[in-house]
Amino acid sequence: MWRTCVVALLAIVPLCAPAQAVERPPQFVAIAFDNCTELERWRELADFAATLNRDGDRLHFTFFVSGVNFIADADRSVYEGPGQRRGASRIGFGGSADEVRQRVDYVNELYRHGHEIASHAVGHFSGRGWSAASWAEELRAYRDIVDRVGPNNGLGDVKFVFPATQITGFRAPYLDRSPGLYAALKELGFRYDTSSDSAADAWPDKIDGLWRFNLARLKLHNSGRGTLSMDYNFFVAQSRARLEPQRHDLFRDQMLQTYLDYFRLNYAGNRAPLNIGHHFFDYQAGAYKEAMMAFALAVCGLPEVRCTTYAALADYLDRQTPETLDAYRRGDFPHAAAPTVVAADRGPAVKHD
């Protein structure tokens, strides 16, 4: 038996399956973005995904868009957050009406190509102390902003190619939430929330009808320091949120290697989905954007890997029986060794075994 297991490891085929195992699940990788303001990033990410998908379905993103991005500066009075003055926001508004129109065009293009649009609330306020009624007020305001994007901004017939009710995923600004959030999400028909964290190899739980897709608690590669699987948390962990151009390459490479560590752990382990969160803002002068893109290029398209939206992940999980999900959590299926991953590093390909 020991000899058989070693040979299977070297061949990268199933290892020593338990007698009652279920089939091995795919390795899901969910890459998502918050706020989603800068127009150049919409174009950049659309082009990046289109390039990867040229020869097949390799990558789809989830975008947690703040509702203020769909309100022109001149029309800010259409929004009033819970307990806030009318026309207030923590992150500004959407710029000119034409910039809002361009953002709508990008969203529609990406939606048509299988990417997901999800909610990051409207004004980016902390909801840590909000009641369920306050959360519901904010979520309803988001739906109204989406469905009335043309009239709100003097844009006539400009509209999204989907109704606001199809936006059923959520991430709280600052990851600040209260018990009332989940009551409001359930009331308004949301399917999942991504505002918490858990161990890197934790499978999602469905609690009171809502999937919880949590960011992962990770160890920085070759370091004892911890971080969450989100670019801003790397920014704090690596440099205390200070821009350090002289360490750009170091920060990029450490994030890339940390993500690859995360990938290998789960791919060869219990196949828990990977949850990676980034922002449109280029923290550390783009080091983290480069790392994320290098990671996606390296793993999306590998055997048994699905780099997909949270909605698609929820679809997959909803099709499984409770017994199958319990087997996944236990790792009760034939395991496979982690594949050799080749990650681009601004030069010749670098091989990471």
Image (cartoon, grey):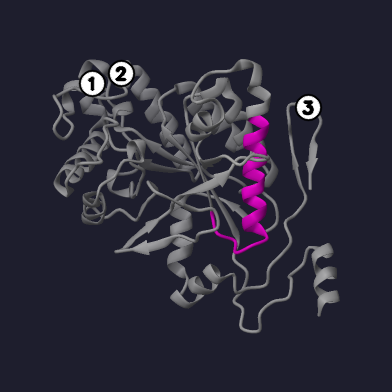
Q: Quadrant of residue 120?
A: top left
Disc 3 to disc 2, C-alpha distance: 41 Å
SS class, disc 3 = loop
Q: Which mark is residue 97?
A: 2
| Amino acid at dot 1 | Gly
Check whether the beta carbons of the residues at disc 1 and disc 3 lie within 8 A of each other: no
Quadrant for the N terminus, please: bottom right
- Earlier along the polypeptide chain: callout 1 or callout 3? 1
The amino acid type, in three-letter code, at marker 3 is Gly
In the image, the segment drawn in magenta is: 252-273
Mark 2 closeness class: few <14, some 14–19, many ≥20 residues within 10 Å: many
Please name the residue that numbered disc 1 is placed on.
154
Query: Residue at (72%, 56%) from the top-left corner?
Result: 338
Looking at the image, is 178 positioned above or below residue 234?
below
**Outermost residue, front direction?**
224
The residue positioned 40% from the left and 23% from the top of the image is: 102
**Callouts 3 and 2 close, C-beta under 8 Å:** no
Q: Is residue 32 left or right of residue 171?
A: right
The numbered disc on residue 347 is 3
Residue 92 horizontal/vertical position (percent)? 30, 20
